[in-house]
Amino acid sequence: MSKSSVKILGYGVDGFDMEQALEFAQDNGGQVVTINPEMILAAQKSPEFSQIINDAELVIPDGVGVQIGLKILGHKVNRIPGIEFGYSLLQNCAKNNKPVALVGAKPEVIELAQKNLKNDIPNLNIVYAHDGYFSDDEAVIKDIIDAKPELVLVALGSPKQEFFIKKLKPSLPDAIMVGLGGSFDVWAGVVKRAPKLYQKLGIEWLYRTIKEPQRIKRIFPTLPLFLLKVLNEKMLRG
Ligand code: UDP
């Protein structure tokens, strides 16, 4: 399957729907970036992070922010929530007897997430799991390589998880590796996902901000600044 990628503020985003994105990742392996406006703004300030996004095998628009930005630029793309994408990959690995690794979140959270996932997904083979609070990347990377997973889900928050995957990727070139933000907290049942209506409207961020008002400091300057930059790009393109 070939990709049709559209650009936003210099970064390519792949225009797949969920099924196509799953098929592409499963056929090709490699790094999957679940991109959002915060990440794009951070990448603009970091050549290393920009490089990682540009080198990723797949970039999927996680939230409504990037979808709106692309709409302003005249492109229609599907939103692919990373948490759903990661869950479907786990289900498909279980069906096909493929081993998986999980890295990230607090120790008690990763424990609970593993337990719940094993209960919910029959035959899920988790060959390695580690919390996300370690200082020696190399030791964790070595243990993951030894476990030979075909799917690695990394939930360290961004951009930490993308940098970690970049380091791991050359040693497991056929595996799929996805940065998944706070997904393990949801799978552990520690954080609730927004109700379905919020999900459908693409405003999960609004729900999370109401629940965790301290997030407003992160979202508030980011989204308007991102959209202003996109509008500027549109003007420049004419
Ligand atoms: N996290 C981690 N190691 C760290 C920092 C964060 O494992 O050094 C985990 C944190 O416990 C949470 C996840 O990364 O499970 C995502 O954190 P956050 O909510 O900040 O990220 P977002 O989803 O907003 O990108």
Image (cartoon, grey):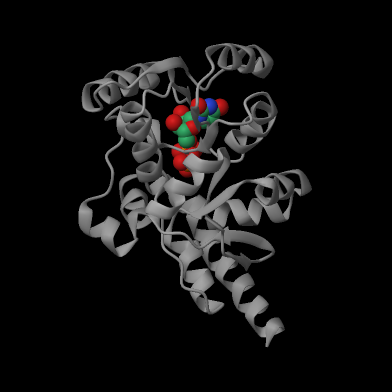
Question: Is residue 68 depicted above or below 48 in this figure?
Answer: below
Question: Of 174 and 188, which appears nearest the observer?
Answer: 174
Question: Of 153 and 160, which appears nearest the observer?
Answer: 153
Residue at 64% over, 30% down: 173
In screen coordinates, is 152 left or right of 125?
A: right
Residue 114 position in % (x across, y down): 34, 20
Question: Of 120 and 25, which appears nearest the observer?
Answer: 25
Question: Is residue 51 depicted above or below 228 in this figure?
Answer: above
Residue at 53% over, 67% down: 224
Give the quadrant of residue 123: top left
Question: Of 168 and 26, which appears nearest the observer?
Answer: 26
Question: Is residue 179 depicted above or below 225 in this figure?
Answer: above
Residue 163 position in % (x across, y down): 66, 35
Residue 29 position in % (x across, y down): 55, 38
Give the quadrant of residue 227: bottom right
Please state, as top left, top right, bottom left or bottom right, where the C terminus lies in the image. Answer: bottom right
In screen coordinates, is 62 left or right of 165?
A: left
Residue 18 position in % (x across, y down): 39, 53
Please count the marks in the image.
Answer: 0
> Which residue of the protein is positioned furthest toward the bottom in this rendering?
238
Question: Is residue 162 depicted above or below 195 in this figure?
Answer: above
Give the quadrant of residue 144: top right
Residue at 53% over, 35% down: 176
